[in-house]
Amino acid sequence: MRDVYVIGCGMTKFGEIWESSFRDLFVEAGLKAIKDAGVDHLDSMYVGTMTSGLFVGQEHVGALMADYLGRAPIPAVRVESACCSGGLAVRMGFLDIASGNSEIVLAGGVEKMNDGADVTFALSTAADQEYECYHGVTFPGLYAMIARAHMHRYGTTRDQLAQVAVKNHFNGSMNPNAQFPRKVTLEQVKSAVLVADPLTVLDSSPVSDGGACVILASEEVAKKLQKPMIKIIGSGVATDSLALDQRDDITALNAVKVSAERAFKMAGLKPTDIDLAEVHDCFTIAEICILEELGFAERGKGGLFTEQGHTALTGKMPINTSGGLKSKGHPVGATGAAQVVEIYEQLTGKSGERQIKNAKIGLAQNMGGSGASSVVHILKNLNN
Amino acid sequence: MRDVYVIGCGMTKFGEIWESSFRDLFVEAGLKAIKDAGVDHLDSMYVGTMTSGLFVGQEHVGALMADYLGRAPIPAVRVESACCSGGLAVRMGFLDIASGNSEIVLAGGVEKMNDGADVTFALSTAADQEYECYHGVTFPGLYAMIARAHMHRYGTTRDQLAQVAVKNHFNGSMNPNAQFPRKVTLEQVKSAVLVADPLTVLDSSPVSDGGACVILASEEVAKKLQKPMIKIIGSGVATDSLALDQRDDITALNAVKVSAERAFKMAGLKPTDIDLAEVHDCFTIAEICILEELGFAERGKGGLFTEQGHTALTGKMPINTSGGLKSKGHPVGATGAAQVVEIYEQLTGKSGERQIKNAKIGLAQNMGGSGASSVVHILKNLNN
């Protein structure tokens, strides 16, 4: 496999973006990424979108975006894995360049969720229709069950859950692209409107519009363009049952664990080698479980690890410096690509107030549904 | 890029398959393909589905199918490009093995269209929602406009259109997996219920359920398993505007032309080197246009080429020996993979009554919408 580098990125502001259509959002992010990379052409494109058919009545998204970016007849493919779609678009671009088929690839994601569709139904298509949705289960309910089980088994506290939101909103308050760039307190999180006990609305990621793109390239192109050498040193994907009831342990996210193991193996690294990570905090409990599956915290200690401040900007393992899905927003198809944008910007010293000093190796973890699919990418700045 | 081989295949019967759910259809095809290839494991999976969110309320299809095939935590990705989804799943599997990332990949497609959804709306999401569907345009209407323009510009006749259906139904009458395995006459096609003038219901592919899968492998694995050496010698993808009105010439399918040029270039072949082809005859006019774009017939002469019998089983360029979308059926996400199944079976002498003698090189062309995306694969039997 050939080496693959990230040579540029771009994203829209996340939020309720009423002035931009579905295609506008992707094109804006794509043009920003192309400009940032300084490339004069693309060899192929991958677009991550979860359920544009249900949200805006539009499938055939690869060709649509290729055309609206002015790039037809470029090869373009849409990939979908629920909220993991953006991360898998990056993965497909990675394989495309690794194979030798392409030199420069645009990989990104987009979702337009605020356009009149039934968001709860549209998102429920990431769960098992026959064994979960049919019985009325929705994602806040699924994650609430995971939270309750984690609290019961490991003693995770309500305050520890809330601390994830407090920390991510603090980070997001310094991110101009964040949907909710404002700080919240523990008390505010706990006393917010209850969505599914014990999770309140401030434990939950919002409904968002947005797009995010990265430009990937071969080593030859990255060197020729004199870009910072940000290499994808690890890429791992894994799956699990869609339905929670079909797993041995609902507090374990096996796809996250296996995808991370695969990425760490490819990179030849261990969790303590990582300087910062973006992880899939669709609900506060998700970040706690993911800390454990990635090996940053011991099994059952993700809540304590958070409470002790290790995941803060100033902690030993900064998590979701962008604000995460919680504060930055969660346009589901775009999220995985936006995570790679944040890691790229951190590794190239472009993160302003929330910059992690001397960040050299970053990890992005993106997952679908209640964890039935997960993709992990590890990026390293080879320059410093 | 490493060489990639097809080492096995499987498909369901196409039709109104009330006894099988969406997931059942893919699992049936997948298990048949795994058995046919004789493999004991898979390294990754690609699933082509157009709009399962709208048809059956289920996205997150890669992980779902991986789990129901008993393969989790295998990496699994769903790819979508409208009716071109199955062909692009094969393309992604090709790149995955070519990159060196995987040795054995399952690539296939599935669609469950007969399950209560509004099929016309669901399919319209392959067109441009803002510039076509909003104004009430549907696919029969779009292809009828292409047909009228082709008749006007090139003198293509009503009988030539109908001849495509007659020929494909003749071929399909020998295919046990076909949805409509019965012969039709020119008069029957022309006098059938009008859908969009000049196209009748017998000029149109049906609404279908079905799944189809192929197993791809590296050269090392193919040799080790002592399989027939059916190599993918060409793979090309291209895109175009979704909306017909944004093209210079609505009788030209530029994505088909460019995807074919890319595949022929990779293979080092020209159209006359091909022994047989499966092409995307969603409507009879589509097959005529595609014959021209692939270089089998001269520009404007696709109808005449058909009328002269060159595309028949006994002609110089047999087209849609399986019966095509027209007779075999068109479960949109599965179609592209099913085309590769037909080519594989023809090249390995398994096509029974419709077998093309001494078939050595076959081509599969799959497209989305009114031609905004197209993928072409060229397979060669290296054994004979």
Image (tube, coloured by chain):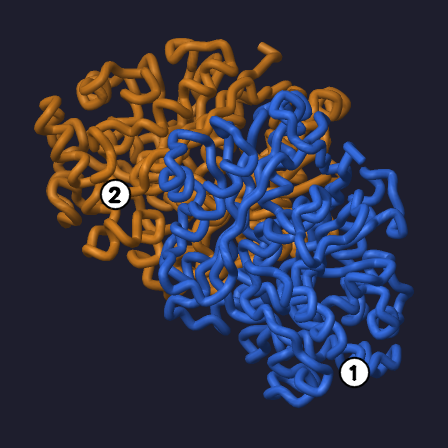
Chain colours: A blue, B orange
Residue drawn at (25%, 54%) of the image: B133
Q: Up-down: is B339 above or below A150?
A: above
Dot 2 and dot 1 within a common chain: no
Q: Residue furthest front?
A: A353
Name the image quarter holding the N terminus of chain A. top right
Q: Where does residue B141 sit, x and y in percent of width and height?
A: 19, 46
* Residue B4 position by quadrant: top right
Q: Is residue A36 left or right of residue B190?
A: right
> Label 1 crowding class (10 Å Cα cut-off): few <14, some 14-19, many 20+?
some
Q: Which mark is residue A159?
A: 1
Chain bearing mark 1: A
Task: Sort mark 2 into few (<14), some (14-19) or many (20+) by Cα contacts within 10 Å.
Answer: many
Q: Which mark is residue B75?
A: none
Dot 1: element:
helix
Disc number lying in front (2 or 1): 1
Residue B183 percent across, percent down from the top left = 27, 36
Q: Nearer the viewer, residue A221 or B109?
A: A221
**The C terminus of chain A sits in image quarter:** top right
Report the residue marked by disc 2.
Answer: B204
**Is residue B160 at all visible to an observer of this figure?**
yes
User: Which residue is pictured at 26% across the width and 38% down the height?
Assistant: B283
Q: Amino acid at mark 1?
A: Asp
Horizontal and vertical percent for residue B53? 46, 60
Which subunit holds the residue at mark 2? B
Question: What residue do we see at 87% from left, 39% from top?
Answer: A268
Residue B254 horizontal/vertical position (percent): 31, 27
